[in-house]
Image (cartoon, rainbow, N blue to C red):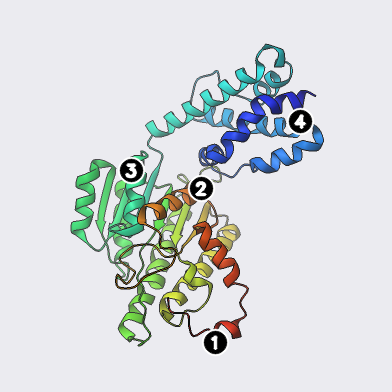
Amino acid sequence: MLGLIDFCTAGLFFLVYMPLGLQDEIDEILGHKTQRYWVAYVLGIPTMFIYTLVWMARIAEELRGKAKELGIEAPYTSWWHMFGWNTFGVLFFGPAVATHRFFDTLNRIENRLKQSGMRKAIIIGATSGIGRETAARLVKEGWEIGIAGRRTEALEAFRNEFGEAAHIATMDVTRPDATHVLDALLEEMGAPNLFFYVSGVGYQNRELDLDKEIRTIQTNCEGMVRLVDHFLNYVREHPEAYTKEKMAHIAVVTSIAGTAGLGTAPAYSATKKMQQTYLSALSQLARMEKIPVRFTDIRPGFVATDILNPDKKYPMLLSKEKAADEVMKAISRKKRIHTFDWKFRILVMGWRLIPRWVWERMTWVKN
């Protein structure tokens, strides 16, 4: 009965706000994924929502530990504060007291993290498109960022717009000295929370222009391997900066084009598949070697960036702004794989069901 009362008060409040971003916010603060809210509520049904109350209390206890770690003064939420007020204090507005203390603790943790400048990101390929849009979003949310790309004038324009929160570095990912540029950026900023690789090129190339094919492979494969591996080794070599509780986050923009080979864009689709497979391999390696890092493979559909042919029409085309919304969602939720948007998720599900021998005979596919 107490669990049912809790569900109708604080539990219902959490049920409304968890899917609206509260759980993502909590996951980011704690540095790991908490049990999904919908699982806790489904499992709560046979226990009259006592299970759900215990789930809420566990999250409260983790926030208590985080608050103490950051040196935040009491009072703060805790297991017993959440459980006790929602059960024994139910006649004295207990759920309201517990919920207020929970959000007060959460807000103070967020403020302390912002003040301590703990959120840092390095973005490779931020001079245009998804990379630039995401960099701008991060700065507006209080991140300190380092951006790298080939076009110095675009980098300087970004810094002029956003000020000291942006560190810039001119870099060509296809050159061996790109790792030295990254080292200088790391030295200037310190250990980042997020390493985001966005650099990429692609062409529709039915003529098999060899220069385009090789350039695509160099940027999308060689460049990614060079810089992602270098940063992964940086994480391995800096145990004082990265721990199991404070893991590094590596995100790479691949593409739904990696689902199957595209006859109109052979190198592009092949390199995107390679990126996806390589991230999977690195994720396994990180577990083998106990390297404190998590990976996110971001797979967009068609996005209105410079990589697309402006003379062609693309189905379900997404704006850079919409794409950045999805990227921010993937980063905050620390999803392993994020395909966007929902229309492309459905498309990919169907695409994977097509047998190889059928797909290779579908010569009407143009994009």
Q: Is residue 124 left or right of residue 41?
A: left
Residue under label 4, please give it.
Answer: 50
44 in relation to 239, above or below = above
Q: Position of residue 25 (x, y in %)?
A: 51, 38
Residue under label 2, please give it.
Answer: 247
Residue under label 3, please give it.
Answer: 139
Question: Around disc 2, counting alpha carbons within 10 Å, would you say few (fewer than 14), some (14 to 19), or many (20 or more)?
Answer: some
**Label 4 close to label 1 by CB (< 8 Å):** no
36 in relation to 156, above or below = above
Between the C-alphas of marks 4 and 1, the distance is: 56 Å
Mark positioned earlier in the residue sequence (1 or 3): 3
Mark positioned earlier in the residue sequence (1 or 2): 2
Say which amino acid is labelled 1.
Arg
Mark positioned earlier in the residue sequence (4 or 3): 4
Q: Closest to the observer: 150 or 53?
A: 53
Q: Residue at x 23, y 55 (%)?
A: 155
Mark positioned earlier in the residue sequence (4 or 1): 4
Say which amino acid is labelled 2.
Met
Is residue 237 shown to the viewer in this render? no
Q: Residue at x 41, y 79 (%)?
A: 265
In this view, the mark in front (2 or 3): 3
Residue 361 circle label? 1
Q: Residue at x 71, y 16 (%)?
A: 90
